[in-house]
Image: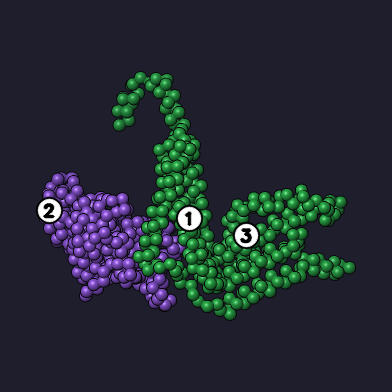
Amino acid sequence: MQVLLKGKLGGAKAPPQIFREQIAVFRRSGYVFLWGLVLHMKDIMKSLYNIRLLDELAEKQTVVHSIHPLAKLLTTMIYLIVVVSFGKYEVAGLLPLIFYPVIIIALAEIPLLPILKRMLLVAPFALGIGAFNPIFDNATMFVLGGFRLSGGWVSFFSITIKLFLALMGTLTLIVTTGMDRLAAALRMLRVPRIFVLQLLLTYRYISLLMEEVARTMQAYSLRAPFHHGVQPGVWGSLAGNLFLRTLQRAQSVYQAMVQRGFIGEYNTGYDSRMTINDTLYLCGWVVFFLTVRFYNIPVFIGSLVTGVGK
Amino acid sequence: MIHHIIEVKNLHYIYPDERKALNSVSFRIVHGDSVGIVGANGAGKTTLLMLLAGAFFPSQGEVIVGGVPVVKKNLPLIRQKIGMLFQNPDDQLFMTTVYDDVAFGPRNYKLDGQEVEKRVSQALAMVGIEHLQNRAPYKLSGGEKRAAAIATILSMTPDILVMDEPSAALDPRSRRGLITLLNGFAHTKIIASHDLDLVFELCDRTIVLKDGEVISDGPTATILTDMALIEQSGLEAPLSLQNCPVCRARKESL
């Protein structure tokens, strides 16, 4: 075969210059296309993986995962209320609240990195909300070793810490409870069925949409090797096609649900009552949150330490 | 055993875009029958299965399952009798774990926790995937997904299994496993497929559809060896009945 190829190609005249250039362009664009395809697919599949990671973490079997979802939901709600109830210049008083997500993450064996990554996604919002505080509110609040700290900077730190705590609290609730059990807890709180169903189906259909996007992008990239990204001329048909395919997929899933007796109530199978342990979990955290809210623990510890020092 | 009988009487179905999918289809399937529905693409197989399971309603004619007409008000009852396996198992598996997916049906029928658990364990054992119960469905292989999808309908303890292309996208070994599994079920089975070898092995009776009409209905061995009929319906003889691809020797059975 090798000999045959040599005989056929080696003996033939080299291709003209114009063809050689075309071959080179084709080869280069081939690499670019493959790299582009890999990047596209990587991004979409990564997002899909990220969504599914939350579900996987929620299926772990730890002490925190075994707590009743209603207890966890109420704890998180009270936690969020306490976090946002602090004044705009409050920084030190907020700090002990970090113990809640940290302890939960440690006990639930949740990897910290994925949680932190998700928080970074929302970080620009916090910066956006608080970014102008240091400019408009420049009255000096503290003087630390000759360095003047304005009220704007203090409120900016306060907003950032509040957002960080609120996100940590919410994410730990999701990764230790799972969307299905969370929905069961919402129903126990008498949240209307339609809202809970909307939440659950949206969460389910996001992954369907992303799967379809990944397939469509793959099909597009394979037939458009010279394009970097989707060309504006095909945006309309691509988006329309994607919408219709997702709709069809969603209808098939809905049909499968209906075939198995689904009549609008999403039964997660979680209808057990709260036990003493669940109540203790809730009460314990509420006592901690209220203590942090009404006693400035860092200042108290500080005065204790300086008192001992004196 | 009236609850296992399916009667299809003069069934017509026209899609909203005016495309005629089924035209005057009639047949009767009795308890324990295993019936193959074959035909080329667009012959109306999937539409027929959807009508049997009450996913669509006929433009004319009627479907009666176990003496109960398939109409909107009877759907909860019909869906307990008929378990429908979709062509794409990804459409059928939507919960976070295989266990929750298999339990979805029984929970919708408000069965108590112990009964749900019993049914799920039985269904998983029947298809041999107990070890996958805590896995996420999207992490399963094609064969495992198909088995999980079958378990989701078995947990509803249906009398009749309706399957749309059950061997689609399965590798040869998974396909063989599926045939063995389905052969072990005593349910009434209706299988729409292009896989004529699967139909040959699983079904005693075959209904041939062409352009939405029944062009033949009879014993599988007779139908699938009638080359003129197979040709007319736009299909090819099952591989097991074709000549040897190496030496071209004819099968003895022919």
The reply, left or right, for residue B210 in relation to residue B138 is left
**Which label belongs to residue A206?**
1
Q: Residues within 10 Å of mark 1 (few under 14, many from 20)?
A: some
Chain bearing tag 1 is A
The reply, left or right, for residue A114 in relation to residue B235 is right
Label 3 residue SS: helix
Chain that is coloured green in the picture:
A
| Mark toward the start of the polypeptide (1 vs 3) | 3
Disc 2: which residue: B226
Q: Label 1 sits on what residue type?
A: Ile
- Image coords of residue A169 (percent x, y): 62, 63
Chain that is coloured purple in the picture:
B
Give yes or no for contact between labels 1 and 3 (Cβ–Cβ under 8 Å). Answer: no
* Foreground pick, A141 / A237: A237
**Which label belongs to residue A283?**
none
Q: Is residue B201 above or below residue A39?
A: below
- Image coords of residue B51 (percent x, y): 28, 61
Q: Calculate the distance from the C-alpha at mark 2 to the C-alpha at mark 3.
A: 68 Å
